[in-house]
Amino acid sequence: MRAAAPPTTPDAADLDAIRRPRDPVVPPSYWDVLERLLPDVSQPAQYVGGEHNQVVTPWARARTRWLLCYPDTYAIGQPNQGIQILYELLNERSTSLAERAYAPWFDLEEKMRERGIPTFSLEHHYPLWAFDVFGVTLPHELGHTNLLNLLDLGGVPIHAADRTLDHPIVLAGGHAAFNPEPLAPFLDAVVMGDGEEVVLEIDDVLRRAKEDRVAGRLADRTALLERLAGVEGVYVPAFYEPRYAPDGTLRATVPVHPGAPTRVPKRTVQDLEDFPYPQKQIVPMTETVHERFSVEIFRGCTRGCRFCQAGMITRPVRERRPETIQRLVTEGVADTGFEEVGLLSLSSADHAEIGDIARNLADVYEGTTTSLSLPSTRVDAFNVTLSNELARNGRRTGLTFAPEAGSERMRAVINKMVSEEDMLRTAEISFANGWRHVKMYFMVGLPTETDEDVLAIAEMGIKVYEIAQRHGRANKATISVGGFVPKPHTPFQWAAQDTPQEIQRKLDLILEQIKPHRGLRLRTNDPEEGVIEGLLARGDRRVAPVVERAWRLGATFDGWHESETLPQWHQALADVGISLEEASHHERGEHEAFPWDHLDAGLDKQWLWDDWQDAISEKALDDCRWIPCYDCGVCPGLDIQHDTAYTNPETRGPSLPILASGPATPASPAPLGGSPDLPTSAARLESP
Amino acid sequence: MRLRIRYTKQGRVRFISARDLSSVWERALRRAEIPIAYSQGFTPHPKVSFPDALPVGYASTGEYAELTLATDIDPGTGLARLSAALPTGMDITTYLVVPDGARRFAKYLQATLWDIAWEPDVDTTPDLVDDLRHRADALLASDAVEVVRHRPKGDRILDVRPPLVDVAVDPGDPSEPRAIFRAVLRNDGPTIRPTDLKVALDGLADHPLPDPRLYTRVAQGAVVDDGVVEALTQQVEPLTPGRHAEAA
Ligand code: B12
Ligand code: SF4
């Protein structure tokens, strides 16, 4: 149970002086008090700031002041590119400043609460309550309780309704912001989609509002929220109300405030070339999960995997040009001193010119200790070729592929167009090329799944393991199986989520099947983990009191094994009176309203429904980048198009599937798109 | 070319752990374009070594590193660049080009001058200084002073007396009183940390001392009468700063 009271904050007059756009009073820095606590907490360097490329702006030099936050530990949140982009953009403006905050671990939080130290920024250790905006990224659902905790710890009322002009605007973005309803009472404003343009627009509105407040032309917080709601893509939850049918089902969420749009669109940056960020990437002084210079090589994904929220909501594909990527990488590596480069995107092997990009970078860093990585799980030989290329300087250790489902039938349902032959041949090529470990991602709990489909996962694992063994006794194969959680704005948003018991039963089936094959490894997550995620992913406003209750009962860091929060959540559900059966485990009907129907991700609901029907009838779709458009709604709706080299016939790459299905023989890697003379020389194909 | 470097670790960077220190240096070396040599093998490592680890949270003006370079550089300008590339609070203060056949760095770092500082407070500092002086005398007069170090793996009993060379109390100036306890500890034998010394001092009167504000490793080198001879500069870092000036 959360016991200690939040820290005290100054009275209104002092807050007003601190928040003034010009000649403000500088807020207190909590560094001195914090410093004394740090010797006694784990990994104290995460709280000190001072990294290379942090931006420290004097309080009085800016008129608007943002605190940007990833609501998890520094180790997890620091590598996120979204926050770093917004940080750089806001700090480039002469009129604004942005500092960063992350969630303190349990040991520090306890001491902070004991001593009244609020949520603080890393740059100056200023308190959250002093800033104009608390900009929080919600990349997934398991940071919701941390958000409440950071607010409370930061001296900000957790309910938006209790805030005045003397409190920061609590603004959320990121993928989970596409259904912010379970957080609606706690957020002032929400942005879906790309943040680059909209933060600057919000910043403009805020700056003017602050000047107007000084001049007595801004009445109250509602007036400020009205102005924010005037920015395209800014959703102010307080201006909307859900309407329920007598049986309790949601009918619609409707605007109840003059001027609030019926549907709020997501924001999309048409040309990533306009925003070559982050360039000045933070270089952490303590371990994080991704220590590398990352460049987002494209945004969006059109493969149309039906379970994948990220793929659906970030459409259309917008590629960065190879020259820009090359420049960002070479300048960034020199500037930061990172030894690893990550070419980031949702499916990096799909960049139209990835072959050239990889080869050119591999050339630049040939013979150096700089390594390149490409998070791609595409199941084909091309991906192996790319990985070979990128591993020129290093060892060929493990490759990861994501067939996602075990049976052909199931893969047609989820629209993952990979055949068993593709997977086996890719494994064959991987091991023949000297890779030692093949990992495969799968899901169970998918719509229409039978036990036969589940067992096919084990079968595929076993076959790949046998290939591994044929190429060397020390070679390894791993199947990693997660429980599927249906997400908003996807064709599977109508699907029922399996109960944790059912997921466990399916995992046990797999375990039983692979038992005789002792070298094949199986990795699974606790099936209970999907319960909270599922509840928050598709929950409506009635879930908000559950979030609050769970947090009050002590839940934070819901995604962490160190933090066992499931009992608090079950308690909270019982206290509030919400059944998981209703919320997550039943299939939804065609005409049922969703809590996110008023939030427009660009996807036509009818198209999603039709795709759901196609899924159930096992009809797969092609990637809409190469073949004619399906009218999913994104492109015409946003008046934009896929921005890839494929639209240019001269650089047009091979169409999908890259490998025609065929017998599982060791083939040489498919040629890369673009120039055929990439140095995938015979020498490099020889088995070690 | 091999370089031995003395550097500081003060302010925020005090909280960088020994484990994270190498990557902080490796990135700074790359930013400063210092041609560091790499070890051979499957996973080559840059040849940067730190003779001994400083506990997280301690400050230091006496940290040391040894670099092996792949090609020679002008150390003055190169290390100035490196110093600028290191995070704030880490500054290179001096260096030595290692002559061929030099003994291992650790051999030169025989003893450490430590400094335990309490928060200055006009009301209590003078009393604390007196108190510290009594405890210092008692400490030097004892043949053995055992302390218990609590560790997750089980408590350990240590005698702080054998490696202790000398101690002094620095009261600061009359206009700016302060309470600093200084000690020279030999580095060989079981490592005694200044926190162990603090525990030892706690036991030498009927009440424990208040918690110190900061522990600082001032310098390392060879033992002399009144402090240590700093390993790279061969200058004496006195146990009691200003004592020579006072006498003069
Ligand atoms: C790097 C990365 C990580 C890193 C770093 C953390 C992070 N999320 O960045 C690590 C390895 C730690 C990680 C872990 C996880 N990740 Co991850 N990760 C990524 C990855 C590859 C890149 C993230 C990124 O930097 N994107 C680029 C930036 C520019 O995009 P962005 O963050 O969305 O920000 C933009 C907008 O959303 C917006 N925006 C974002 N925040 C805000 C805030 C405000 C106020 C505003 C105005 C705008 C705004 O503006 C930004 C610029 O346009 C993405 C995939 C991808 N390509 O996006 C997955 C991804 C975000 N991760 C995902 C998942 C599931 C996880 C894990 C839960 C996995 C797991 N099961 O453990 C964990 C959770 C960790 C945690 N506890 O928080 C999923 C999210 C699922 C979804 N929404 O559909 C993604 C999309 C991958 C996927 N395809 O499934 N991840
Ligand atoms: S390839 Fe499929 S799973 Fe991966 S991001 Fe694209 S749609 Fe999602």
Image (cartoon, rainbow, N blue to C red):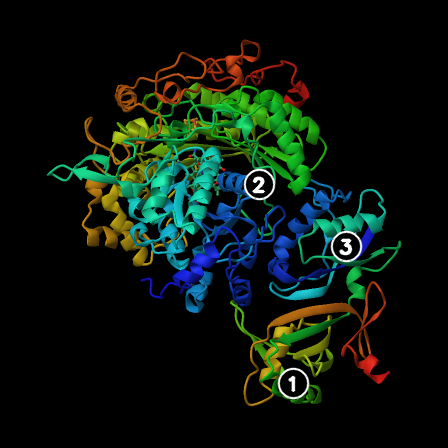
Amino acid type for the residue under numbered disc 2: Glu
SS at mark 1?
Answer: helix
- Of badges 2 and 3, the one in the foreground is 2
Badge 1: few (under 14), some or many (20 or more) residues near its Cα, within 10 Å? many
Q: Which residue is mark 2?
A: A92
Instruction: Name the residue: 61% across, 33% down.
Output: A372
Residue that protrudes farthest toward the top in the picture: A649
Rounded to the nearest whole Å, what is the CA distance between mark 2 and mark 3?
Answer: 38 Å
Percent coordinates x, y for residue B97 in the rendering: 86, 54
Same-chain check, marks 1 and 2: no
Ligand 1 resides in the quarter of the picture at top left
Cβ–Cβ under 8 Å for marks 1 and 2: no
Percent coordinates x, y for residue B89 in the rendering: 67, 58
Residue A468 seen in the figure: yes
Rounded to the nearest whole Å, what is the CA distance between mark 1 and mark 3?
Answer: 38 Å
Q: Which residue is mark 1?
A: B129
Q: Is mark 3 within 8 Å of ligand 1?
A: no
Amino acid type for the residue under numbered disc 1: Val
Toward the viewer: A479 or A332? A332
Badge 2: few (under 14), some or many (20 or more) residues near its Cα, within 10 Å? few
Percent coordinates x, y for residue A76 in the rendering: 49, 47
Badge 3: few (under 14), some or many (20 or more) residues near its Cα, within 10 Å? many
Rounded to the nearest whole Å, what is the CA distance between mark 1 and mark 2?
Answer: 50 Å
Q: Chain of mark 3?
A: B
Q: Chain of mark 1?
A: B
Q: Which image quadrant is residue B241 in?
A: bottom right
Q: Which residue is mark 3?
A: B66
In the image: residue A40, left or right of residue A554: right
